[in-house]
Image (cartoon, rainbow, N blue to C red):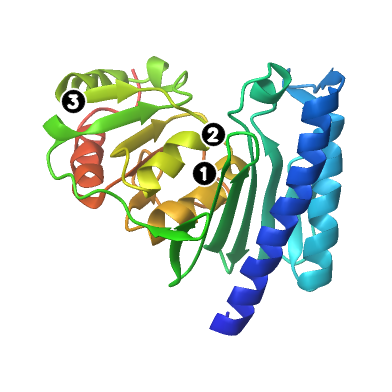
Amino acid sequence: MHVERLAHALEAARAAAQAAAQVILRHWQSGVAVEWKSDATPVTQADREAEQAIRAVLARALPEAGIYGEEYGRSGNEHLLWLVDPLDGTKSFVRRTPFFSTQIALMEAGELVLGVSCAPVYGETMWAARGMGAWLDGRRVTVADTARLEQAALSTGNIKSLAADARWAAFGELVRTVDRIRGYGDFCHYHLLARGALDLVLESDVHVLDVAALAVIVREAGGIFTDLDGQPPGLATRSVLAGVPALHAQALARLRAAPRSC
């Protein structure tokens, strides 16, 4: 994708995220009924209306692209594919906590090339595109230069499946080694990582729509973003190890040294 076309797509993604933010904020202020999906996760009218608003903007800007959305599924071009979670963190949304966001990414030929992460109540929007750096509300950001695990701040999100894996012991060693352990979760710890306020993020239970945009943001901020096996993010991604380069390498080596299962 040429730079001009990529910049156009990024502008469209940012506009789509703002359209979704307007929908989400309206429902945040007025309240919304909660339904439950077959997988026991909540969904609201805010989720559906936000995705509709996003789809409308993206279809006008890049009609040749396909789209894979949390609420309305996957269709269209597989080579050029939007990945959309209109309201990532619906459980937080319905419990009136600000840790939810809109996630929009673009994948070209299997590579994530741009991402927008908009958290309207938390009050941050980050975006990035291949070769263009990572930005927080118009200010360019980079990851920290932390070099030693003993100096690191590590944040975890969903790690339920890791607790049933033999690598749980390696994770425990990592926790004992780092300086601080936190659990910011959702978009928040990736934002903190990209702007240098955190050093490592580890999750074992994610969906690609939750993290695709954040992967581009972390990468463009100078960080490394893989799954727990060290593989780059893709449509099948279900785990994350993200961090500043030196610490990502050290943490990945520890996980790789452990057996895959009990």
Amino acid marked by disc 3? Asp
Element under disc 1: loop
The answer to the question of whether label 1 and label 2 lie on touching residues, with beta carbons closer than 8 A, is yes
Label number found at residue 261 = none
Q: Earlier in the sequence, mark 3 or mark 2?
A: 3
Work out how far the residue at label 3 is from the one at label 2, CA to CA, in angstroms. 25 Å
Q: Report which residue position mark 1 lands on.
A: 237
Q: Nearer the viewer, residue 68 or 256?
A: 68
- Which callout, 3 or 2, points to the residue nearer the camera? 3
Q: Report which residue position mark 3 lands on.
A: 179
Label number found at residue 206 = 2
Residue depicted at 82% across the width and 41% down the height: 23
Q: Horizontal and vertical percent for residue 236? A: 56, 45
Q: Horizontal and vertical percent for residue 113? A: 53, 66
Amino acid marked by disc 1? Thr
Viewport quadrant of the N terminus: bottom right
- Which callout, 3 or 1, points to the residue nearer the camera? 3
Q: Is residue 2 visible?
A: no
Q: Is residue 160 left or right of residue 55?
A: left
Examine the rendered structure and indicate whether residue 107 appears above or below residue 125.
below
Mark 1, residues whose alpha carbon is within 10 Å: few (<14), some, or many (≥20)? many
Mark 3, residues whose alpha carbon is within 10 Å: few (<14), some, or many (≥20)? some
Mark 2, residues whose alpha carbon is within 10 Å: few (<14), some, or many (≥20)? some
Residue depicted at 66% across the width and 75% down the height: 8
Amino acid marked by disc 2? Val
Examine the rendered structure and indicate whether residue 155 appears above or below residue 199.
above
